[in-house]
Image (spheres, rainbow, N blue to C red):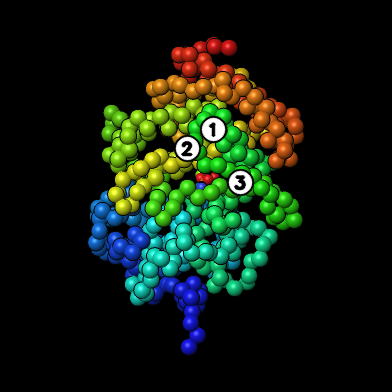
């Protein structure tokens, strides 16, 4: 009989058992017995929790929140063109797509094993094993080789990555990397990631994801995409802030922000370190008018062996910034009236959380010029727009300087 590699074996057989009984695994540890609806891919019941301490961080010991945790692991319904991808792959929902890939991901070490199969982490995980990019190509519409055989689209880490932008995991020069595609808004979101990286470099802040821009061919056109190397590993998992707070009730006297700090400290983080990164992030997001620093766009690195956080995750996803979706670029006092999706509704109010207003804005001299030239180089936006965007960086930096000098710029007083 012909020998099969594990991968071939997986492709050849349907991974969905009729019963829908699965074991939730953390690497090779049996964490819980669960029942899945194999049609919708939903986690229906938690039948038993064997190892409560191995449940995903943020899940209660009875495992009740696992269903929510699982659904957040799948591609969100808001992802553009998701329906076409699902129909092409022959599944109903993104959770069913996730189940086909055994729930494997490149951000943590969880997966689900059908009870009638004997499978092992070392054979399946995407950190060590190569994976096909075909599902990823479908998800990004890349004009790469997408075979008709849907079986080949089964097992992919691209089925378990959140966020609205079209994206796929790739292996480039041996490095697992996330490629995010930008086909509208002049491709600005991809370039914004690089601009943010340059700002962090100038400020000497090492804890950020290094993005680069490349072009990807879709529908006969080249579009900018951002590529970032994996910040997780076989020994480091990512826990989004949202997951940490998923089951946490915020006391009336506290805030979401303070609860996050407190919970992080309970998980082993040094309070000072958490505050330093959150405050740095708030100040630099302000400079770039990043409107999307929600709880899935920040988080912690988890050491599964010692069951504690070791660090904050490096700053990532600063794409929704610099007025990428605005036809008219705001200026002057309008820059203090920006709505954001984060700890506060109004961006300027976020600065109230900053207890140590320290940032060496001198290091940002010429940064607006650099941002403008990156926008001109990599996007097809009119030069005038790139110039206006650069001007907002200049104006926001000036406002931030006022804040650093003790002015409460969120109050609607005249400082200009
Ligand atoms: N470099 C990376 N290494 C590991 N995980 C990543 C990396 N970049 C993003 N992720 C994971 O992928 C998710 C989606 O990426 P993100 O950049 O936030 O996309 P979007 O812009 O669509 O929101 C993140 O929430 C995080 O869980
Ligand atoms: Mg995101």
- Residue at 64% x, 66% y: name it: 146
Q: How far apart are marks 2 and 3 (CA)?
A: 18 Å
Tag on residue 226? 3
The quarter in which the C terminus is drawn is top right
Q: Are marks 2 and 1 in contact (CB under 8 Å)?
A: yes
Nearer the viewer's eye, disc 1 or disc 3? 1
Count how many numbered circles sit on residues in the image: 3
Label 2 crowd bin: few (<14), some (14–19), many (20+), radius 10 Å: some
Q: Name the residue under label 2.
A: 207
Q: Where is residue 223 in the image (x, y as percent from the top left)?
A: 69, 48
The answer to whether residue 178 is left or right of residue 251 is: right
Tag on residue 284? none
Q: How far apart are marks 1 and 3 (CA)?
A: 17 Å
- Residue at 58% x, 43% y: name it: 211
Quarter of the rendering containing residue 350: top left
The answer to whether residue 303 is left or right of residue 325 is: left
Q: Position of residue 192 (x, y in %)?
A: 61, 37
Q: How far apart are marks 2 and 1 (CA)?
A: 8 Å
Q: Position of residue 415 (x, y in %)?
A: 54, 11
Mark 1 Cβ inside 8 Å of ligand 1 = no
Compare marks 2 and 3 and give the one earlier in the sequence: 2
Quarter of the rendering containing residue 379: top right
Q: Are marks 2 and 3 in contact (CB under 8 Å)?
A: no
- Residue at 60% x, 39% y: name it: 194
371 is higher (above) or lower (below) than 141: above
Q: Mark 1 points at which residue?
A: 200
Quarter of the rendering containing residue 138: bottom right
Indicate the secondary structure of the residue bearing disc 3: strand
Q: Where is residue 45 in the image (x, y as percent from the top left)?
A: 31, 62
Nearer the viewer's eye, disc 2 or disc 3? 2
Indicate the secondary structure of the residue bearing disc 1: helix
Q: Nearer the viewer, residue 394 or 258?
A: 394
């Amino acid at each position: 009989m012909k020998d099969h590699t594990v991968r071939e074996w997986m492709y050849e057989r349907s991974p969905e058992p009729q019963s829908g009984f699965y074991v939730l695994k953390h690497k090779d540890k049996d964490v819980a017995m669960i029942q899945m609806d194999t049609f919708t891919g939903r986690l229906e019941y938690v039948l038993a929790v064997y190892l409560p301490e191995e449940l995903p961080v943020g899940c209660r010991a009875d495992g009740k929140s696992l269903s929510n945790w699982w659904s957040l692991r799948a591609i969100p319904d808001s992802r553009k063109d998701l329906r076409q991808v699902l129909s092409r792959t022959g599944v109903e929902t993104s959770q069913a797509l996730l189940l086909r890939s055994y729930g494997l991901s490149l951000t943590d070490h969880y997966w689900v094993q059908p009870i009638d199969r004997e499978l092992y982490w070392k054979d399946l995980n995407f950190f060590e094993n190569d994976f096909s990019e075909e599902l990823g190509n479908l998800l990004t519409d890349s004009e790469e080789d997408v075979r008709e055989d849907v079986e080949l689209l089964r097992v992919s880490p691209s089925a378990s990555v959140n966020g609205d932008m079209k994206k796929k995991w790739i292996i480039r020069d041996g490095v697992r990397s996330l490629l995010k595609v930008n086909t509208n808004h002049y491709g600005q979101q991809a370039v914004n990631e690089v601009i943010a990286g340059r700002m962090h470099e100038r400020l000497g802040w090492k804890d950020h994801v290094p993005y680069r821009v490349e072009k990807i061919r879709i529908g006969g056109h080249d579009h900018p995409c951002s590529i970032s190397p994996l910040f997780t590993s076989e020994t480091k998992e990512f826990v989004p802030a949202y997951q940490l707070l998923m089951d946490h009730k915020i006391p009336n006297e506290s805030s979401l922000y303070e609860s996050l700090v407190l919970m992080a400290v309970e998980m082993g983080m040094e309070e000072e370190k958490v505050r330093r990164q959150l405050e740095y992030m708030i100040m630099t997001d302000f400079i770039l008018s990043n409107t999307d620093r929600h709880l899935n766009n920040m988080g912690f690195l988890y050491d599964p062996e010692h069951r504690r956080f070791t660090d904050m995750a490096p700053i990532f996803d600063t794409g929704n910034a610099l007025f990428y979706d605005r036809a008219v670029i705001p200026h002057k006092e309008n820059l203090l009236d920006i709505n954001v999706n984060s700890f506060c509704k109004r961006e300027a109010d976020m600065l109230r959380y900053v207890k140590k207003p320290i940032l060496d804005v001198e290091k940002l001299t010429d940064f607006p010029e650099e941002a403008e030239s990156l926008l001109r180089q990599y996007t097809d936006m009119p030069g005038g727009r790139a110039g206006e965007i650069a001007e907002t960086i200049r104006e926001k930096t000036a406002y931030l300087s006022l804040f650093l000098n003790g002015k409460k710029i969120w109050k609607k007083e005249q400082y200009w």
